[in-house]
Amino acid sequence: MIEDILPPGVTSSEAFDDAAPAPLFPAEAALMAGRRARRRRQFATARACARRCLADLGRRPVALLPGPGGAPRWPSGVVGSITHCEGYRAAVAAPASAVAALGIDAEPAGPLPRGVLALIASEAERAHLAALAAAAPSVPWDRVFFSAKEAAYKAWYPATGIWLGFRDATLTLSPAGGFTATLHPPLPPPVDPVYEGRWLAGPELVLTAVARGAGGPERAPQPEMISVGAPS
Ligand SMILES: CC(C)(COP(=O)(O)OP(=O)(O)OC[C@H]1O[C@@H](n2cnc3c(N)ncnc32)[C@H](O)[C@@H]1OP(=O)(O)O)[C@@H](O)C(=O)NCCC(=O)NCCS
């Protein structure tokens, strides 16, 4: 599924259960010691996905440990991202020479719990989502919105080390499957704070992905983007 929303040059691997977890490196196993079984299984399956991505890139398997802020530390010369939710685990990776930033997120399809949208969306963003929902009521727009902000954050954080809350980003979703997240860090940002991504909503899952090419503030071309009630 996730490959449908990735640009060329980004490799991916996904799993829908924990039937094939990776054997963990000692440092990974130590990290998971004492954690709940569900978290250990999720972690090991996502590591299996990540190591398949590394193999695709011709890289040997290594331990993927969290760095500051929880972002996984990929081997030098590789950028990547990991996500997991109920019934889904995935990793994506690319050579850092080609891709500067990657962020993916998976969420169960369906509306967000009551009250969450008010915490994560501005008034303008809520109006934007209402317009989208009026035009395409079958899409769980608030879930796509939440996921897209998380994907943008995962692309942003490893490059900057700056934590941002959901209200520190303005998101515009396109019914055609694209989105733009404009981040508002407290200080002038060290990297271009505008991220382009893609989203996909299936019957069970919502997936989002952000990828930025290396070598400049390139944004993925999305000629088919149509804005519906975009926040100004
Ligand atoms: C970090 C966060 C985005 C993770 O998302 P999530 O839906 O809870 O969990 P997911 O399963 O999709 O992703 C978890 C994986 O993300 C990765 N991750 C964790 N922190 C990360 C960070 N700071 N940067 C990049 N990747 C990160 C890890 O690989 C983790 O899996 P692992 O612990 O098994 O290695 C979320 O918990 C969070 O803190 N959000 C608040 C910040 C935010 O999203 N702001 C939005 C506005 S920009």
Image (cartoon, grey):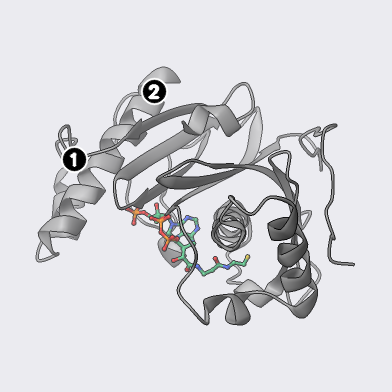
Q: Which quarter of the rendered image does ligand 1 occupy?
A: bottom left
Asked whether 63 or 151 is in front, the reply is 151
- Of labels 1 and 2, earlier in sequence is 1
The relative height of residue 59 versus residue 114 in the rendered view (above or below) is above
Q: Is residue 55 left or right of residue 109?
A: left
Residue at position x 76%, y 35% from top? 220
Residue at position x 46%, y 31% from top? 1
Q: Is residue 6 left or right of residue 178?
A: left
* Secondary-structure class at tag 1: loop
Confirm or deny contact between disc 1 and disc 2 (CB under 8 A).
Answer: no
Residue 27 point in image, percent of width and height: 19, 51
Residue 201 point in image, percent of width and height: 53, 44
Q: Is residue 134 left or right of residue 73?
A: right
Asked whether 166 or 98 is in front, the reply is 166
Q: Amino acid type of disc 1?
A: Asp
Number of other residues with Cα within 10 Å of mark 2, as a class: few under 14, some 14 to 19, many 20 or more: some
Residue 63 in sight from this viewpoint: no
Q: Which residue is most to the right? A: 232
Residue 59 point in image, percent of width and height: 39, 23
Label drawn at residue 18: 1
Task: State the image quarter where residue 46 is shown.
Answer: top left
Residue 121 in sight from this viewpoint: yes
Tag 2 residue: 59
| CB at disc 1 and ligand 1 closer than 8 Å | no
Q: Total number of numbered labels?
A: 2
Q: Amino acid type of disc 2?
A: Arg
* Secondary-structure class at tag 2: loop
Residue at position x 73%, y 38% from top? 176
Residue at position x 17%, y 49% from top? 41
Q: How far apart in space, not on screen, are marks 1 and 2 (Cα)?
A: 23 Å
